[in-house]
C-alpha cells in the first residue's frame, strides 16, 4: 500500500513549498497553511488509494490460485469488430485474472455514488471493455465484473442492472454487477473454492488504516533528519526559493521549525562539507541568516 500512497508528509510539504508556495499560503486560500497543507496531502493520498487497493486485491486473488494477466491492451494488435471511440488506441483494465478456460476482468470502484453523467460514462467504459476483451480472448470465456467495494452505496444499481439486461445474450450472461463481499461469489463459482476474498481484503485495509493513517505533525523540528533529507532532494532553484522566499520563511517557518533545531543542524552539516556544490554554496548564507533571525 505504502508503495502507492504518499506517506511522507514532511517531504511532500517541503517540496510543494519549494515549487509553488502559492498553492499552500497567501490570501487566495480559505484555509490556514496548516489546514491547507494537511488537506493537500490528504488529497494526494486519496488520489493514490484506488491504485493501492487494486494491488492488494490482486495479491489476494493470486494467492488463491488465479493468474494475474496484463491489464493494458494495444488495440492495433487485434482485429476487433467492437466499435471503438475515435482515437481510441488502447484499453486499460483495473484487474484481469485467468483460471483454466476463464478470464475475469474487474472494473473496480470504491463506491457507487456518482451522478447520472458519470455513471453512464462508467457503463460505456465497462461495456466497451467487455466486448473488446471477449474478442481478444475469443477462445476463452470472458466474465466482466463491475465491483463497487462499499456496499453501503448503491445509487445507480438499478441503472447498471438495466444496462446489463439490455446487452446481447452472449455478453449479458457474462456481465456481473456486485457490491462488497459478493465479489467472493465470482471467483468461488468458477474455481469451486470457498474463499473469503473480501474479508481478507477488508481485514488488511483495517490493519493498514490503523497503522498508517494519522493526522500529520506540523512541528518538523521533532523529526529534523526527515526535513534534512527533503532539503537534500531539492534542486538549486527549489532550495533558493524555500530558504530565500520571505513568504515562506516568515509565514511558514515559525510553524514548521518553531525551535529552529532543524535549521541549526542543517547549517552545521552545510559548514562541514569540504567541497560544497553550487546549491550548497548559495543556500548556506540563507540558512545562516534564518538561524540568526528566528
Image (spheres, helix red, strand yellow):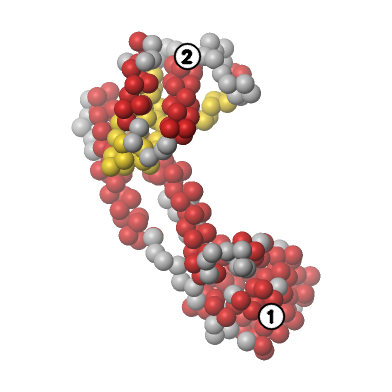
Q: Secondary structure at mark 1?
A: helix
Establish if 9 lies above or below 1: below
User: Which numbered dot is residue 171?
Assistant: none
Tell me where residue 189 appears, x and y as whole percent. Answer: 24, 24
Tell me where residue 211 appears, x and y as whole percent. Answer: 35, 61
Determine the image quadrant of residue 234: bottom right
**Spatial distance from mark 1 to mark 2, Cα to Cα?**
63 Å
Q: Quadrant of the C terminus?
A: bottom right
Asked if marks 1 and 2 touch (Cβ < 8 Å), the reply is no
Task: Indicate which disc, 1 or 2, sits on the residue closer to the N terminus.
Answer: 2
Relative to the observer, which residue lies in front, 66 or 27?
27
Q: Secondary structure at mark 2?
A: helix
Can residue 90 be seen here? The reply is yes
**Residue at the limit of the structure toward the left, as seen here:** 194
Q: Is residue 230 left or right of residue 121?
A: right
| Residue wearing tag 1 | 287
| Residue wearing tag 2 | 135
Tell me where residue 247 appears, x and y as whole percent. Answer: 67, 73
**Residue at the limit of the structure toward the bottom, as seen here:** 292
At a point 41% along the width and 38% down the height, the residue shown is 114
Amino acid at each position: 500500500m505504502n508503495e502507492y500512497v504518499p506517506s511522507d508528509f514532511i517531504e511532500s510539504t517541503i517540496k510543494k513549498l519549494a515549487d509553488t508556495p502559492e498553492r499552500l499560503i497567501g490570501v487566495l486560500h480559505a484555509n490556514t497553511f496548516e489546514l491547507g497543507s494537511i488537506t493537500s496531502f490528504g488529497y494526494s493520498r486519496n488520489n493514490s488509494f484506488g491504485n493501492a487497493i487494486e494491488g492488494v486485491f490482486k495479491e489476494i486473488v493470486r494467492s488463491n490460485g488465479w493468474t494475474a494477466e496484463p491489464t493494458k491492451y494495444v488495440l492495433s494488435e487485434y482485429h476487433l469488430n467492437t466499435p471503438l471511440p475515435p482515437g481510441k488506441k488502447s484499453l486499460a483494465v483495473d484487474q484481469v485474472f485467468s483460471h483454466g478456460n476463464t478470464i475475469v476482468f474487474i472494473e473496480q470502484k470504491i463506491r457507487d455514488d456518482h451522478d447520472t453523467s458519470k455513471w453512464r460514462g462508467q457503463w460505456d467504459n465497462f461495456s466497451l471493455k467487455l466486448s473488446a476483451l471477449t474478442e481478444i480472448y475469443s477462445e476463452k470465456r470472458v466474465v466482466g465484473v463491475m465491483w463497487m467495494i462499499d456496499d453501503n452505496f448503491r445509487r445507480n444499481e438499478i441503472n447498471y442492472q438495466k444496462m446489463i439486461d439490455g446487452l446481447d445474450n452472449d455478453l449479458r450472461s457474462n456481465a456481473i454487477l456486485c457490491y462488497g463481499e459478493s465479489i467472493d461469489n465470482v471467483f468461488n463459482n468458477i474455481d469451486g473454492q470457498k474463499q473469503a476474498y473480501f474479508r481478507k481484503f477488508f481485514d488488511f485495509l483495517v490493519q493498514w488504516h490503523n497503522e498508517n493513517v494519522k493526522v500529520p505533525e506540523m512541528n518538523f523540528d521533532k523529526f529534523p533528519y526527515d526535513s534534512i533529507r527533503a532539503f537534500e532532494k531539492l534542486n538549486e532553484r527549489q532550495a533558493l526559493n524555500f530558504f530565500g522566499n520571505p513568504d515562506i520563511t516568515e509565514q511558514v517557518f515559525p510553524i514548521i521549525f518553531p525551535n529552529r533545531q532543524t535549521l541549526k543542524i542543517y547549517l552545521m552539516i552545510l559548514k562541514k562539507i569540504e567541497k560544497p556544490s553550487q546549491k550548497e554554496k548559495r543556500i548556506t548564507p540563507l540558512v545562516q541568516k534564518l538561524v540568526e533571525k528566528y
